């Protein structure tokens, strides 16, 4: 069935790889998938522990997906190391130059590792090579079950530019928290000691589930690809505004809106449901 859908969508079969089904609890590859580092010029996949965002949801199957995919040959001969630390990919954001941007509400939450900040920074430095840490203490989207993942709030566009989720409606329940987050971002400095260039992203109109609860729809959950940026869209007037904002952040990339009105009903968006792997990790194979 997946092959049929790919064919109908016009996907290039030589660029698609399908593997035997792996049991899962949910669909959020960003949070249970492998995080790649490079050692001596070679990629190494790190398989951190996953506990369902603080044991909120079943997670036993998701915690084993990476190891099972490795056993199926999905990552070829790329080295895979298990790390005895709970960490979700959506909870960390980096400029690629040694800086980690994250939220205290997530990474320092007792429902994750129960570690204090110095010890957690030590382990993140050891495993991921970070040498600077920027901790946000404000910002949250209603309906977000992750304890304020950074990939819903603020993202690096380059080493000196941050795009962040804003809210300009004082009547919106997000207004105060996102305003406080913006003020906090203004205090952050680059490695060179300069203020960041801050790009505010608009907030789409409230989207709600079948019970009337607010869903965590926003535009910071974009996905950076080779030559393009995929931006979540919600059939909302603010989609075009957000696209223009990101065009200014990524002048050499195409900004492509991807409909996420259905996906957001699952509690996440585009970045949450994907995971990057560098060239060479996925082996050449027969077309799907």
Image: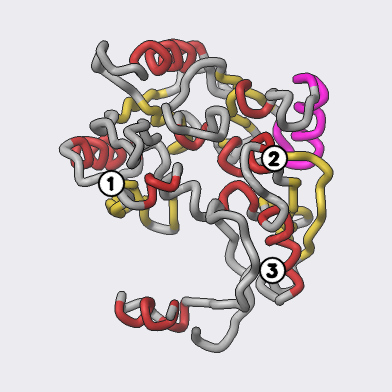
124 or 214, which lies in front?
A: 214
* Alpha carbon distance from label 1 to label 3: 30 Å
Residue 236 visible in this rendered orientation of the protein: yes
Q: Name the residue rendered at 49%, 37% in the picture.
A: 151
Q: Give the range drawn in magenta.
A: 116-130
Q: In which quarter of the image is residue 109?
A: top right
186 lies above or below 85: above
Residue 128 covered by magenta stretch: yes
Quadrant where the N terminus sits is: bottom left
Of helix, strand and loop, which one carries label 1? Answer: strand
Image location (x, y in percent) of residue 223:
43, 49
Spatial separation of the CA atoms under disc 2 and disc 3: 19 Å
Q: Is mark 3 on a helix, strand or loop?
A: helix
Residue under the image location 27 percent in, 42 percent down? 247
**155 or 247: nearer the eye?**
155
Residue, disc 3: 69
1 or 2: tag closer to the N-terminus: 2
Q: Residue 273 carries which label?
A: none
The label number, if any, that marks residue 87 in the structure image? 2
* Secondary structure at numbered mark 2: loop
Tell me the crowding category of disc 1: few under 14, some 14 to 19, or many 20 or more residues within 10 angstroms, Cα based: many
**Among numbered discs 2 and 3, the one appearing first in the sequence:** 3
Residue 215, given in percent of the width and then of the height, sits at 37, 36
Whichever of labels 1 and 3 marks the residue nearer the N terminus, that label is 3
Measuring from the top left, give residue 37's x and y in whole percent: 70, 51
User: Is residue 150 positioned above or below 287 on the image?
Assistant: above
Q: Reply above or below: 211 against 193.
A: below
Viewer-side residue, 195 vs 63: 63
Q: Where is residue 66 in the image (x, y as percent from the top left)?
A: 70, 61
Quickly name the residue at label 1: 233
Q: How far apart are marks 1 and 2 (CA)?
A: 27 Å
Q: Is residue 114 magenta?
A: no
């Amino acid at each position: 069935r997946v092959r049929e859908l790919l064919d109908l969508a016009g996907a290039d079969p030589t660029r698609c790889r399908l593997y035997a089904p792996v049991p899962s609890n949910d669909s959020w590859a960003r949070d249970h998938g492998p995080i790649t580092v490079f050692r001596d010029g070679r990629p190494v996949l790190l398989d951190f522990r996953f506990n369902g965002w603080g044991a909120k949801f079943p997670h036993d199957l998701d915690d084993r997906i990476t190891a099972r995919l490795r056993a199926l040959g999905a990552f070829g001969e790329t080295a895979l190391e298990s790390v005895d630390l709970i960490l979700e990919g959506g909870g960390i954001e980096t400029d690629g130059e040694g800086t980690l941007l994250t939220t205290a509400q997530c990474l320092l939450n007792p429902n994750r590792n129960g570690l204090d900040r110095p010890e957690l920074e030590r382990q993140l430095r050891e495993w991921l090579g970070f040498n600077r840490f920027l901790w946000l203490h404000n910002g949250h989207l209603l309906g977000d079950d992750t304890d304020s993942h950074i990939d819903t709030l603020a993202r690096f566009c380059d080493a000196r530019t941050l795009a962040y989720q804003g809210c300009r409606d004082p009547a919106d329940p997000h207004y105060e928290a996102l305003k406080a987050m913006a003020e906090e971002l203004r205090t952050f400095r680059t490695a060179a000691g300069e203020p960041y260039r801050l790009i505010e992203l608009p907030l789409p109109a409230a989207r709600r589930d079948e019970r009337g609860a607010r869903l965590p729809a926003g535009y910071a959950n974009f996905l950076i690809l080779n030559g393009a940026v995929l931006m979540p869209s919600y059939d909302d007037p603010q989609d075009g505004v957000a696209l223009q904002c990101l065009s200014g952040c990524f002048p050499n990339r195409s900004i492509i809106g991807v409909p996420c009105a259905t996906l957001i009903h699952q509690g996440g968006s585009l970045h949450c449901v994907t995971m990057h792997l560098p060239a060479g990790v996925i082996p050449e194979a027969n077309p799907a």
